[in-house]
Amino acid sequence: MSPLRLPTSPVDVVVVGARVAGAATALLLARRGLDVLLVDRGRYGSDTLSTLALMRAGVLQLHRWGLLESIVAADTPPVRTTTFHYGEAAVEVAIRAAGGIDALFAPRRTVLDARLVDAARAAGVRVVHEVRALDLLRGESGRVNGVLLEDPLLGPRPVRASLVIGADGANSHVARWVDAPIERSARNASGVIYGLWSGLDLQGYHWHFRPGVSAGVIPTNDGLCCVFVATTAGRFERELRGNLEGGYHRLLAETDPGLAARIATARRVGGLRGFAGRPGFLRRGWGPGWALVGDAGYFKDPITAHGITDALRDAELLARAVATGGDQELAGYQESRDDLSRDLFELTDAVAGYDWDLVEVQRLHLALNEAQRREVRHVGALDSAWALPRSA
């Protein structure tokens, strides 16, 4: 590891966190000519807990940024149908062609995160993995003007910047260091268990619902499907935390016996991973010398599988604000983020409460679909040339 990896002179922006939100934000800022440092405490290309599914707005953005082709080239299967299973009834929805895309995708995070980091580096971002952020730097007025990073060879190293962006997840250190207040809180949380399976031979997204439980099947790379089961965080704590294996198969059988039978003849790749749940939130998204993006600023329950799409959307909203102005534009970023998120947030919270019957959950899904359509319209109306490489 070279001690020269961290810059010694000031940069325009430091982005802390090189997953989807951070890498995408850094990429777009660099394409607008800003000097960007992107750091992450994890390894390049490492995996992370995720539902994987991209919704239309997220796929549209990857297409507009010129990155979707590389995702497809990684043998990410196209998703051309979404099927909602309400008890014994099934409602299949075809993915219509629009805006240059005719399918959805659910790339492994080893694929998506790496492609975004690679694109950021190609755009001129200085990318440094396996480096921890220790604290923020501040000027005499208290404004954030950099970040203290831990170089494994040289120890703590200050890097000055006009803006520090926290993209370091729901437990964001940056958000804690700036004391970013939570301005909207969810009431409910799902406990989720995830597994990767080979040999399922299922096409498209499948979402399964019965009162008190749910499950999802998401086709991804290498012929695998991410299959999750979910219930209330309280039930997860009482019944599942101590026995993920038994709880996983029990919830599958409770949600959809047919799916459970398919799983019984499939082969699991790797272990099961549990998420005990946490209520969603919208944090204040900016302040003097800092901003938050992705789960650091906006986290909602994974039950509606919209988190990656949120991250891509908000990365572009923030990058446009940073590249075109100052604090007033950052305030506009938060306003747009919150406006686009409000219905998605509240409807997701209602689904995560599991206080619904099959008629009510269908109504919630119809409302979610309308909120996503509004999001797609907003993203689709953005100037697509803005986010392309400067030579394009």
Image (spheres, rainbow, N blue to C red):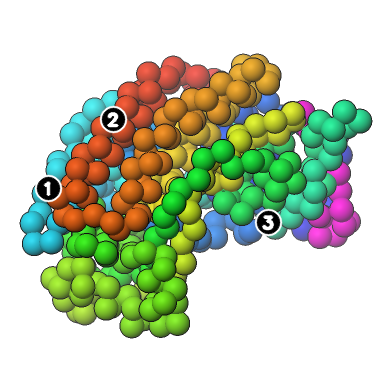
* Identity, as a three-letter code, of the amino acid under mark 2: Arg
Give left or right: position of 72 versus 313: left
Q: Nearer the viewer, mark 3 or mark 1?
A: 1
Task: State the residue at coordinates (56%, 21%).
Answer: 332
- Neighbour tally class for label 1: few under 14, some 14-19, many 20 plus, Cα within 10 Å: few
* Identity, as a three-letter code, of the amino acid under mark 1: Glu
Task: State the residue at coordinates (74%, 29%).
Answer: 288
* Contact flag, marks 2 and 1 (Cβ < 8 Å): no
Of helix, strand and loop, which mostly describes the magenta segment? strand
The x, y position of residue 33, in whole percent, is 65, 23
* Identity, as a three-letter code, of the amino acid under mark 3: Arg
Q: Which residue is mark 1?
A: 92
The boundaries of the magenta stretch are 149-162
Q: Which residue is mark 3?
A: 41
Magenta-drawn stretch contains 156: yes
The x, y position of residue 175, in whole percent, is 67, 45
Q: Which residue is mark 2?
A: 373
The x, y position of residue 57, in whole percent, is 35, 34
* Residue extending farthest left: 89
Q: Earlier in the sequence, mark 3 or mark 1?
A: 3
